[in-house]
Image (spheres, helix red, strand yellow):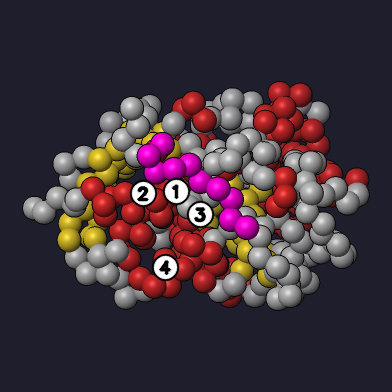
Amino acid sequence: MTTPSTQPRRRIVELATRAPSIHNTQPWLWRTSSAGLELYADRTRQLGAADPVGRNLTLSCGAALHHAVVAAAALGWATQVERLPQGPSASLLASIALTPGTPSDDAGADLRAIDERCTDRRRFTSWPVPDSTLGDLARAAASRGTRALPLVDVTERFHADVLVGRAAENQAGDQRVTAEHRQWVDHSRVDGIPSAILPAERSSMARAQNRFTTGLLQDRGRDVEGSDGLIVLCGDQDDPANWLAAGEGMSALWLAASAQGLSVVPLSQVVEVAETRDALTRQVLGGLALPFILLRIGWQPISRSELPRTARRPVTDVLDPP
């Protein structure tokens, strides 16, 4: 078996680090192996207040895992992934065996989607996302082993919206959580969320829906909520294996959405708060699944300027670190 040289593995990791992560914490470490690459959770970057069990951390790492697999295929490497090879309590989340192949048919489009994907928290247009498109995106996520449910019923959407606001209000009253949020705004030049890409406060309603209150980005216009698409990623067990799969599914959905010009915004706060997570399970999912993350999907105005991409840690910091 041909072992990939250092340069292809560095390039795969570089592209994998473009994945979304909670507060852009980038909570992953990569190590080379005789077969390819290994993905580890970086517990030093876990959000102790908002994510004490590591659900969001594992979701983030799952997104990086999927980005790596897509990047490898685009660069001409076949992959074989083993998830949680040392069990759910270990920091090693996945190993990727790499063997030479040919670039995927969609290599160019996949690399563009990885490059163009970003989190744009500005309001969407009033143009609705068709139910058929939401179904396609849900299937893209489900192809990675997670469950993905579009919320198209008016009552489901109403309950989800109310619960997102309730979760935001709950966290706004938690000093540990709000301090953690502030810590990751303008955290450093290579991680965290720049205040320049966060919408400024607009109203008390906006504050209730937005955990970040120090943004500098002007976002004028009317509030639009009714036309937003909503998809819940969920599973049968609230455990690392399901979280990792949900992260992979989120990445697959997000890249598919980016290729169609759609924006995706994760609404993780509704799952971070126990009360609203339980209510989401009962009121929206009918007790048939456990939610891991809620995704808001919509169209950005054509005339709106693109946001700068958030910075990423250098590959030297995340690949075979000392």
Q: CA distance from mark 4 to mark 3?
A: 15 Å
Secondary element type, mark 1: loop
For the residues bearing labels 4 and 2, Cβ distance under 8 angstroms: no
Closer-to-camera residue (240/199): 199
Secondary element type, mark 3: helix
Q: Is residue 194 left or right of residue 34?
A: right
Give the labeled residue for mark 1.
17
Who's the residue at 39% across and 73% down the image?
Answer: 108
Q: CA distance from mark 2 to mark 1?
A: 6 Å
- Pick whichever of labels 1 and 4 is earlier in the sequence: 1
- The image shows residue 42, relative to residue 139, as above or below, that is above
Who's the residue at 46% across and 27% down the image?
Answer: 43
Q: Which amino acid lies under the numbered mark 4 shown in the image of this protein?
A: Asp
Magenta residues? 308-317
Q: CA distance from mark 3 to mark 1?
A: 15 Å
Who's the residue at 53% across and 30% down the image?
Answer: 46
Q: CA distance from mark 3 to mark 2?
A: 18 Å
Q: Nearer the viewer, mark 4 or mark 3?
A: 4
- Pick whichever of labels 3 and 2 is earlier in the sequence: 2
- Pick whichever of labels 4 and 2 is earlier in the sequence: 2
Q: How many marks?
A: 4
Give the labeled residue for mark 2.
13
Give the labeled residue for mark 4.
110
Give the labeled residue for mark 3.
250
Residue 49: image quadrant is top right
Q: Is residue 232 left or right of residue 40?
A: right
